[in-house]
Image (cartoon, helix red, strand yellow):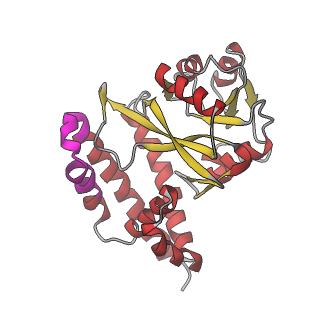
């Protein structure tokens, strides 16, 4: 009833538990970015299909463009079922979420996609408050879905988007703090490139009108664009997550996460300045 898409890059540690959580699907696709560990072997052990994008540049995250990478999968992978569920290797489908996924696929109504709530964990603590938004579109009709932005892409759906119950559990620190830092160092480079592209593209001026849009993704895109134009962004992000979003209620984990997100934002600021300085007059 539901096909599953799991993007990977050297996920031998997390992939087994991820695939166990979607063992209820008989159409699981591991969309691999040329891993050099046991990812392909593990996918085969679980009966998943291994897919690799022929034109992807190995060694570069998502080939340098996550939106293009994800959209390629939706247009080229021969999914068995009309509904596709996307999850990362460090995420787990809870039994409650499975029931809601199957119910939505059977009776979608006019919806072409569904948004769900994700629970992120640090130090075995659910980061319940210290998140900008815990809601993500993960169940969709692939022919109605595409992505935008080089990194942390926005999911664009041509049609109505519903809301699912249950939770998707996420363990972003499963490989340790050093891995998280290294990954976000790479992500910050792509974020800086995206900011520069936005500033050079006059079409993004229309984003301001979308701040009051009824569409969740349009509002989020406009908010992100506005945020990238504010001064003192690293400090503002910490204040937003830790105080405005009540991140202090998440204890030590909340404080740690807010500080790390502030550090990530500072890397984006520095790399954007670097690109600005290198830009021809």
Between 66 and 60, the one lying in front of the other is 66
Q: Position of residue 270 (x, y in %)?
A: 39, 64
Q: Is residue 6 visible?
A: no
Magenta region, residue range: 237-254
> Which quadrant of the figure has residue 26?
top right
Location of residue 24 with respect to 104 vertically, above or below: above
Q: Quadrant of the C terminus?
A: bottom right
Q: Quadrant of the N terminus?
A: top right
Is 251 inside the magenta-drawn segment?
yes
Taking the spot 30% from the left edge, 59% from the top edge, the residue there is 234
Is 133 inside the magenta-drawn segment?
no
**Residue 140 vs residue 21: left or right?**
right
Between 94 and 48, the one lying in front of the other is 94
Single out the residue that lies furthest toward the top.
45
**Residue 246 vs residue 53: left or right?**
left
Q: Is residue 230 visible?
A: yes
Q: Position of residue 76 (x, y in %)?
A: 80, 43
């Amino acid at each position: 009833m539901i096909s599953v898409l799991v993007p990977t890059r050297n996920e031998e540690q997390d992939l087994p538990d991820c695939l166990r959580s979607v063992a209820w699907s008989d159409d699981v696709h591991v969309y691999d970015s040329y891993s050099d560990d046991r990812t392909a072997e593990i996918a085969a052990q679980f009966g998943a299909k291994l897919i690799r994008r022929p034109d992807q540049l190995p060694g570069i995250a998502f080939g340098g463009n996550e939106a293009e990478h994800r959209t390629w999968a939706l247009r080229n992978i021969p999914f068995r079922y009309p509904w596709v569920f996307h999850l990362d290797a460090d995420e787990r489908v809870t039994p409650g979420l499975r029931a809601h996924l199957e119910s939505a696929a059977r009776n979608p109504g006019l919806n072409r996609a569904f948004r769900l709530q994700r629970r992120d964990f640090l130090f075995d603590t659910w980061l319940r408050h210290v998140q900008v938004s815990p809601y993500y579109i993960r169940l969709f009709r692939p022919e109605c879905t595409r992505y935008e932005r080089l990194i942390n892409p926005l999911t664009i759906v041509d049609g109505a988007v519903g809301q699912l119950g249950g939770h998707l559990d996420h363990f972003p620190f499963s490989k340790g703090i050093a891995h998280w830092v290294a990954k976000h160092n790479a992500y910050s480079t792509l974020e800086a490139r995206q900011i520069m592209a936005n500033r050079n593209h006059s079409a993004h001026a229309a984003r301001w009108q979308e701040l009051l849009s009824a569409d969740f993704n349009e509002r989020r895109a406009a908010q992100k664009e506005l945020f990238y134009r504010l001064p003192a962004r690293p400090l503002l992000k910490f204040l937003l997550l830790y105080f405005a979003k009540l991140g202090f209620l998440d204890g030590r984990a909340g404080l740690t996460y807010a500080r790390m997100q502030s550090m990530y934002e500072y890397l984006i600021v520095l790399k954007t300045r670097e690109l600005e300085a290198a830009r021809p007059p």
